[in-house]
Amino acid sequence: MRPATVPGAREKKQKLEMKMAKAKDNKAKEEPIEKQLWKAADKLRKNIDAAEYKHIVLGLIFLKYISDAFKELHSKLKSGKGDFSGADPEDKDEYKAENVFFVPEIARWSYLQSKAKLPTIGKDVDNAMDAIEKDNLSLKDVLPKVFARGNLDPTSLGGLIDLIANIALGNAKARSADILGHVFEYFLGEFALAEGKKGGQFYTPRSVVELLVEMLEPYKGRVFDPCCGSGGMFVQSEKFVAEHQGQVNDISIYGQESNQTTWRLAKMNLAIRGIDSSQVKWNNEGSFLNDVHKDLKSDFVIANPPFNDSDWSGDLLRKDGRWKYGVPPAGSANYAWIQHFLYHLSPSGIAGFVLAKGSLTSKSSGEGEIRKQLIEARLVDCIVNLPAKLFLNTQIPACLWFLSRNKANGGYRSRTDEILFIDARNEGHLINRRTKELSADDIQKIAATYHKWRMGTRAHLAPRPPKGGDLGAYEDIKGFCNSASIERVRELDYVLTPGRYVGLPDDEDDFDFKERFAGLRKEFEEQLKEEERLNKLILENLEKVKLG
């Protein structure tokens, strides 16, 4: 016999199911569009490695961007109104004049989307990339032609094309560029996380880039990155200017990258943001052997060079003119990079860059002497100790160096005989089990500390009002920041580890051996004395015991 149905049970179950479905739908809607897109695109990846898949997805996003920009201008030219009266919508020069890439018919998004369900779609996209490069010399050898490979299922590729078609709705170039640019940047970070160690070679974590840019404030002038990866430093510099109501055209960028695949990502990343990348160069020899910007004197250097690089051809460059403060060891490029950055700084230029933390203490192969010369030349402005787990490609502890060619003024107070030390090891939060990032508050806290110290009591000389209004006066904070004199740095034998100055115990790799040994010895001697006292007390008590 069938059990009786509880009145209204079915209706209640249906309502509950509808409520759950609605909640799920709302959750999906709450997720940022870039996160939803990433999940959808990742499902289509199947058996393709992230390292290969990123060129497929990012290539399509780039293609969508230039197609949207082309379509908007094409419509205006076709209408023939106002300034576009009598214009030919198929004339390449019309697009060049408006700084828009010309997209031939076989490469236009509408054409490719009409072919998305065909088994030949991979070949069609490769042909589109070839055609765009032929009509736009600045994109020569930049775009990926990887879409007809056997491991990429045509159905999945068609699915990606349909997915990306919905990223930017409408045809407003500014909106399209902003959304597509944001998605491109987000995907770069997600692919770097997916690739892990390998991904770190082309991508500097966004929070580290944001911190460097917020501290340097590259609001006007020439910005140089001689190991530029996928161009994140440049993108963030442009964002900084825009966010502070500056003129984006007031800065120009110069870069170099030795990995051609990474250089291609940089060129696309910059193009999608409308940033002129004509001075971002590639050669496989790298910045030390083939410095393509040899005569450049930049206002800002911002970089994340490879940590402790032993394969930098140092043996071939022993007499190079860049080594003004000492010849760097052939086994590590750290101090070669530092001097390369200084060589490219203008008389009032500032450099901010990432290095392995060992660069703050190393004395091997003459590095200690070079560091001494840099300090005595009054070039070191600020050192920031970073939290662990920020970088995808290494667990090596890292730090930020800031060098200034003109600490006497340069628009700020004179701080010639001081160095600011910031210990930010306790900042940041985990985004997964292996990776940390700095929050906006962390970045603001560290950057504001540097700005307050640099401005001193002459805040009215600052080149722009600080973000968030008056910063207030600088003060040393025990365990976080300290403004140390050059004399104090000399006393500590030119070691630049912030923990030595701000008042916290140093890391195990930084501890003072003599001090630690003396402390352990004293503790051991006190334990021996206590043991002797207790043994004596035990013997005295035993003597008091009377045997029956």
Image: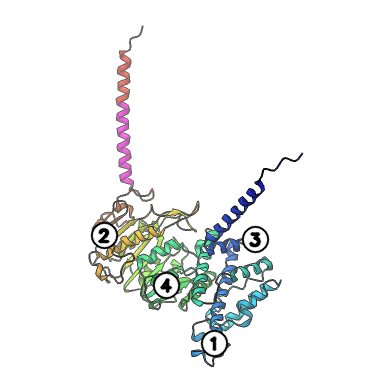
User: What residue do we see at 31% from left, 58% from top?
Assistant: 421
Q: Which residue is mark 1?
A: 77
Q: Amino acid at mark 3?
A: Lys
Between the residue at mark 3 and the residue at mark 2, the CA separation in whole angstroms equals 54 Å
Q: Amino acid at mark 1?
A: Leu
In the image, the segment drawn in magenta is 513-532
Image coordinates for residue 337, horizontal then vertical, percent: 40, 66
Q: Which mark is residue 474?
A: 2
Main secondary structure found in the magenta portion: helix
Image coordinates for residue 122, horizontal then vertical, percent: 66, 72
Q: Would you say residue 430 sits in the magenta stretch?
A: no
Left or right of 502, for residue 285: right
Choose between 272 and 167: the one closer to the eye: 167
Choose between 413 and 394: the one closer to the eye: 413
Q: Are marks 1 and 3 in contact (CB under 8 Å)?
A: no
Q: How is the image coloured?
A: rainbow
Q: Dot 2: what SS?
A: loop
| Sequence-first disc among 3 and 2 | 3
Q: Which residue is mark 3?
A: 46
Q: Quadrant of residue 428?
A: bottom left
Is residue 357 visible in the rendered structure shown here?
Answer: yes
Between the residue at mark 3 and the residue at mark 4, the CA separation in whole angstroms equals 36 Å
Q: Quadrant of residue 221?
A: bottom left
| Sequence-first disc among 2 and 1 | 1
Q: Amino acid at mark 4?
A: Glu
Q: Nearer the viewer, mark 4 or mark 1?
A: 1
| Sequence-first disc among 2 and 4 | 4
Q: Dot 3: what SS?
A: loop
Q: Which residue is mark 4?
A: 238
Q: Which image quarter holds the C terminus?
A: top left
